[in-house]
Amino acid sequence: MEKHDKDHAELSEVFNKDEDRVNWHDETLWWVRAKRDKAVNQLPEWETLRDLASQIKHNVLGSLDIYLEQFEKNALANGVHVHWATDAEEHNKIVYQLLTEKSINRMVKSKSMLTEECGLNDYLAEHGIEVIDSDLGERIVQLAKEHPSHIVLPCIHKKKEEIGELFHEHLGTPAGVSDPQFLTETARQHLREVFLTRRAALTGVNFAIAETGEFVVCTNEGNADMGAHLADIHIASMGIEKLIPERKHLGVFLRLLTRSATGQPITTYSSHFKSPAEGKEMHIILVDNGRTTQLGREDFRNSLKCIRCGACMNTCPVYRRSGGHSYQNAIAGPIGSILAPNLDMEAHADLPFASTLCGSCSNVCPVKINIHEQLYKWRQVIVQSGKAPAGKKMTMKAMDITLSSPGAYRFAGKAGRLALKFIPFAVNNNLNPWYKHREMPEPPAQSFREWYRSNRNSK
Amino acid sequence: MTVGLFIPCYVDQFYPGAAIATLQLLEKLGVNVVYPQNQTCCGQPMANSGFEHLTSGCNRLFLENFADFDYIVAPSGSCVLHVREHLHDEKIAGQAAGVSKKVYELTSFLTDILNVESLPSRFPFKVGVHQSCHGQRGLHLSQMSELVAPAFSKPGKLLNMVKDIEIIQLDRVDECCGFGGTFCVAEEAVSAKMGKDRVADHLRHGAQFITGVDMSCLMHMEGILRRQKSETKVIHIAEILNAE
């Protein structure tokens, strides 16, 4: 991946030029967080469920090889084809090959963040295959030629008026119409034709059960089912970390997933796929794409517990005020910021710093990933590997010298306070990012140490 | 009992009032307090920026200054959390671990060690309480809104002992103010917006003062209040608990 032209801070600055939009974005996502709070507070056992889910995933990550082989064996016995992909490119090639073998050049796809991670749509488009996303939010960003800004709510950055304009342009709705019900009905009719005519459907996988070889796909729109049941070939792409050991564990995760994501008790559809219908094919692609590398990083391993609920994004005060696109990664927000550096540390060196380390993300995480601690740890790894900006290194070195010596500290403190008091223009200008929206602290006449020396016996 | 007073560097330099109030409050409660004068900074600004490997000088100084006290108390949740989690010295690992366990944020020292049940203070104003993230989510000074767990608040318990104070309710009880150390300049746009939003919540509910356990968050919000020429002031919780 190439280094980005702008980093998270610069893109956030652009996003913040329209304060009304920032307010709207923040309040919309805060409303989802509040819905989540209401839902989880109805379950006295909520924290126990989180513990349990975290431990189940801990077990999975500890024996991933065994569970993967068990899953493969059972899936094969169910009549499902199983493919293994080391990276994004291999995944995309497998999909392409499956389609070309059947002379298929149009596919319908339900939501899969993994295919976003792999850049599947662009890859297939370059190879002459049309993909239509059937999740409403994903279809909207697809029409806008954008990427999802949120893993659960892909077009949360778009206002309904903007969606109305897109539909007017692409789906022929009357100009100026933005009634959500009307637009949704238009999308339904448009997608119905797609479902009926596509011979191939790709879905993601929320949970794959090693014990039975089946997998579960959760949607609110039923779009995964419509696609998969009507097509001749169903391809399911899953990251290798999506496994759970047994069917009985599913209850734990299904209870956690949607309460965390949107505050619903459960998704409208939790569809179990086990074996292909007669005359049809079912394929599962097991994708690594950096996951085994992350598994080998002890400090970051448990980021693989993620079940992609998006709760950390909704609660993140930075995400809500910078928008998903400022993260420049298929998965934005706090969880994206600890996953992305694993894939490309240089390209995503800005992300672990796009946080105040407030810790709200770790608290809402249904599988108890210590997200904010991992952000801290990634900062250390990025700096140690020489990826920190040069200016920052100089400042930090100077800070170290000053703070390691009481004499130097006292001198710098005095100089700092004097500078503030007598030459305010030296700091109170727009070259100092603090001063852009905030006044500097008023310098006191003396430091506490000076006060202490004159008011208490020197001890 | 002798307590070593650990005053964060920016409090020493910019907010001596919070440090003086901390000292006077502890003395008022009968504690023998000593301020070791060669202390500088805990090293958090560097560590949170990814330069924890440069903090060995700060760690060594901290141990030299504070190792011998029964307890170490600071009017800051953030600096205390840093020391608790990151104070180390390879040469004297055991000692470093022992010292970091003795470090307390002021309000939790008052509630958990001194078991304070009443205070002679009075503060007849409408006050908004800012939950500083490191104190709250890091040191568990009060319950976090994300969890399904019983409510409690150590700073809140102490503020309830203050006569004539009126604590206002906020729309978002524990959202971050956006200070975040070097985040406040590195991510200026988001940081300032977070600060503005946090301040607005307090103003909307009529706060005359915004208080909290961390002067850094308060400094951030003060910068915004003063830019808006607001009458509302920030004040460290030690200054309220010490007010008469």
Image (cartoon, coloured by chain):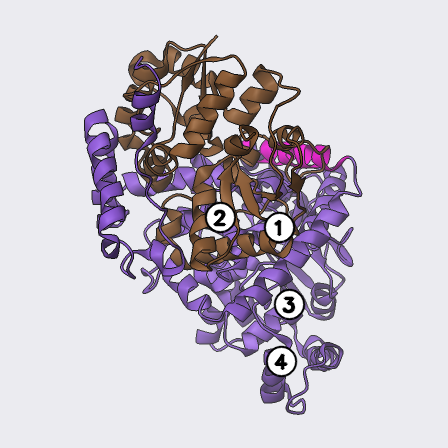
Chain colours: A purple, B brown
Amino acid found under the numbered disc labelled 4? Glu
State which tag comes first along the sequence, 4 or 1: 4
Q: Are marks 3 and 4 on the same chain?
A: yes
Instruction: Indicate which disc, 2 or 4, sits on the residue closer to the N terminus.
Output: 4
User: Which residue corresponds to mark 2?
Assistant: A288
Q: Earlier in the sequence, mark 1 or mark 3?
A: 3
Does residue A329 appear to the left or right of B169 in the view shown?
left
Secondary structure under tag 3 reads strand
**Label 3 crowding class (10 Å Cα cut-off): few <14, some 14-19, many 20+?**
many
Can you give x and y, in whole percent of width and height, for residue A453 in the image? 30, 21
The answer to whether residue A31 is visible is yes
What's the CA distance linking mark 2 and mark 4?
39 Å
The residue at which mark 4 appears reads as A161
Observer-side mark, 1 or 2, equals 1
Q: Residues within 10 Å of mark 4 (few under 14, many from 20)?
A: some
Distance in Å between CA atoms under marks 3 and 4: 30 Å
Tell me, yes or no, whether the two marked residues, 1 and 2, touch with CB atoms within 8 Å. no
Q: Earlier in the sequence, mark 2 or mark 3?
A: 3
Residue A419, how many percent across, how many down?
Answer: 23, 46
Q: Which residue is mark 3?
A: A201
At horizontal 56% and vertical 32% (from top left) the residue drawn is A63
Kindly indicate the quadrant of the structure image that contains residue A24. bottom right
